[in-house]
Amino acid sequence: MRRLWLLFAQTVTVGLALWFIVATLKPQWLSSLPRDGRAHVASSVVPMQESASAPPAHSSYREAARRAMPAVVNIYTSKTARQQPNSPFLDDPFFRRFFGERQREQEKQVSLGSGVIVSPDGFVLTNNHVVEAADEIEIALSDGRKVSGKLVGTDPETDLAVVKINLKDLPAITLANLDQSRVGDVVLAIGNPFGVGQTVTMGIVSALGRNHLGINTFENFIQTDAAINPGNSGGALIDTNGNLLGINTAIYSRSGGSLGIGFAIPVTTVKTVMESIIKTGQVVRGWIGVEPQDLTPELAESFGTGKRNGTIIAGILRGGPADRGGMRPGDILTAIDGKPVKDTTDMLNAVAQLAPGSRAKLTVLRKNEEATLDVTVGTRPRKRPETVE
């Protein structure tokens, strides 16, 4: 009896040892056995696959790009180069055969840019420098169609232009509400950089209201680090809903390529200029005929004033609106129609928004005494010396 008990104990011990080894090294062997002790053939494992109709991940901006890309076009412009004197060798049929075609090709210069469809009726917005002095304008749509464009009007002082194409029911972009934009918002830039084809780049709003850059007369740029390169000019800067925030117009670069500092004309300026060009073919702005200068702390001290806001009237156009209204060189313009003037840029924008022919009350500081001048606003000349407002 003792031998049987010893044999049983040894058998149990070995069994437990084997179970421990299997459970430690090959636990899947145990899990494959059902609880009822019967073995079953393991079924094949089918991996889960994302549905084709599944919504995009939160980090994707493909829906914004999908909405805006059809409204962004490529613009090809050409202009006839200045004619060069014909070479006497071209009179020879042999030389004309090899050099004549080359000369004709050089008679036209071609440039490339981008544009944005802002109306289903065929109005396309772009930069003035893209279409400036062009003899021919060709618009290439995102669906592959190409059509000639006609220049409606330009505004060199904001570097904007409107082109019309004879197509209907076009995919027009939606204008965004810039008041809701903040520094740090994600933005996308769409255009045709270097002629490689329509391209989307991503960045953020780096700054709002950039000015004093010397790019345009009227500056209120959106700064972004979204890659903008040659060929992107006139393209769209959009928000994450696919709405137009601005028109890409310039970059800061030492190499000609993107360094992460790009500038776009904001949609607030775009809307005003676009509507004026479509309606009248040009932009009409107010003008008072002065040469403004920023009021620096040093100049404020030399004038003996504690004012830090405003602009100094360094010069006045004789016979101009300001001259007729009694303004004098050395006056410090502090307010227009009761609204404070911060600096020269603020003054230029405020005067430009005044309707020509209307009367404006200009508040000036003259020898530390405040005075109010009644000035009849004139029409800003299309071409003027850069130093005269």
Image: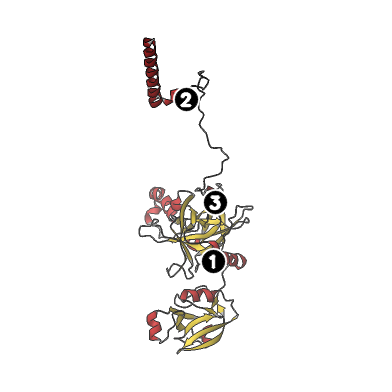
On the image, the x and y values in percent for residue 72 come to 54, 53
Confirm whether residue 380 shows in the render: no
- Foreground mark, 2 or 1, reads 2
Say whether disc 3 or disc 2 marks the residue closer to the N-terminus. 2
Q: Residue furthest front?
A: 1
Give the percent coordinates (x, y) of residue 48: 52, 33
Residue 66 image offset from top left, x and y in percent:
55, 48
Sequence-first tag of 1 and 3:
3
Q: Nearer the viewer, mark 1 or mark 3?
A: 3
The amino acid type found where label 1 is placed reads: Thr
Percent x, y of residue 88: 38, 56
Q: Which label sits on residue 269? A: 1
Q: Which mark is residue 376?
A: none
Q: Write down the residue under mark 3.
A: 64
The numbered mark at residue 31 is 2
Q: Is residue 47 visible?
A: yes
Q: CA distance from mark 1 to mark 3?
A: 22 Å
**Relative to residue 216, is residue 224 depicted above or below?**
above
The one nearer the camera, 117 or 9, is 9
Q: Quadrant of residue 314?
A: bottom left
Q: Amino acid at mark 3?
A: Ala
Q: Nearer the viewer, residue 138 or 29?
A: 29
Q: Give the residue type that dot 2 points to.
A: Ser
Near mark 1 (Cα within 10 A), the count class, few <14, some 14-19 or many ≥20, is some
Q: Residue at x 46, y 57 (%)?
A: 204
User: Quick one: 264 or 207, which is closer to the camera?
Assistant: 207
Cα distance between the residues tagged 3 and 2: 49 Å
Location of residue 204 with respect to 57 vertically, above or below = below
> Which quarter of the rendering shows the N terminus?
top left
